[in-house]
Amino acid sequence: MMPQWLLQIDGGILLWIQDFLRCALLDPIMTVYTQLGNSGILWIVLSVVLLCIPKTRKAGFVSLLAMLLGLLCTNVVLKHLVGRTRPWLVVEGLVHMVEEHDPNSFPSGHTCAAFAAASAWCRTLPKRWMKVVAVVMAALMGFSRLYVGVHFPSDVLAGMAVGLFCGWLAWLIWKRLAAWRGWEA
């Protein structure tokens, strides 16, 4: 159970986004972008593409491992342990823009997958611009979850933290595996 003060802050931020940032131009963009994160599909597709290119193969492998760890942490363990309900069910006046079939909100799995992939890519991609794009895309995914009203800000922050941790852990696992197998880390 989340403290009442956190619910008030989280709910206030969501209502502010709804009242002051939602608009006819951004609504369809944010709706499509957030849905690209369903089941981590955007990040999985990008990781598989990276896996197919020799110079970025390590980035693809590490990001897929990071997302698998993130899935286990968020969707298998934390969401069921915490059992936090979706914001539109408890924040009066909040309208959600996409359907969510998982009743559990904390932490954000979309944000976790995005930051797990971005964290892995920041450690493994060869070009600085690629790393910047990865972080911007992950941050945009987290924001899109708030914009469409399906997560509280604290859900997104927790998803980001879990994703960053899983990206770091996947990198450590890769380094150990590479050392054990005699690959270039």
Image (cartoon, rainbow, N blue to C red):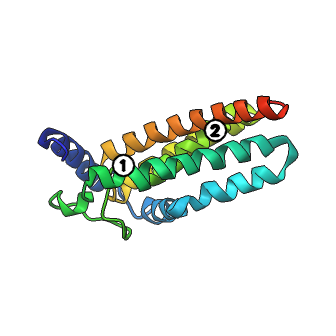
Extreme-front residue of the structure: 180
Residue marked by disc 1: 78
Q: Secondary structure at mark 1?
A: helix
Within 10 Å of disc 2 (Cα), the crowding (few <14, some 14-19, many 20+) is many
Give the side of residue 83 with respect to residue 143, left or right: left
Residue marked by disc 2: 120
Residue 9 visible to the viewer:
yes
In this picture, is 39 found above or below 66?
A: below
Q: What x and y, as percent, mark residue 73?
A: 45, 47
In this picture, is 114 found above or below 124?
A: below
Of label 2 and label 1, which has the lower sequence position?
Answer: 1
The three-letter amino acid code for the residue at tag 2 is Ala
Q: Which residue lies at the image location 44% right of the left edge and 36% below the top edge?
A: 161
Q: What x and y, as percent, mark residue 42?
A: 61, 58
Q: Of discs 2 and 1, which sits in the foreground?
A: 1
Q: To which quarter of the image does residue 18 belong?
A: bottom left
Residue 108 visible to the viewer:
no
In this picture, is 40 found above or below 13?
A: below
Q: Secondary structure at mark 2?
A: helix
Q: Which residue lies at the image location 52% right of the left edge and 62% below the top edge?
A: 39
The three-letter amino acid code for the residue at tag 1 is Leu
Q: 107 and 35: which one is in front? A: 107
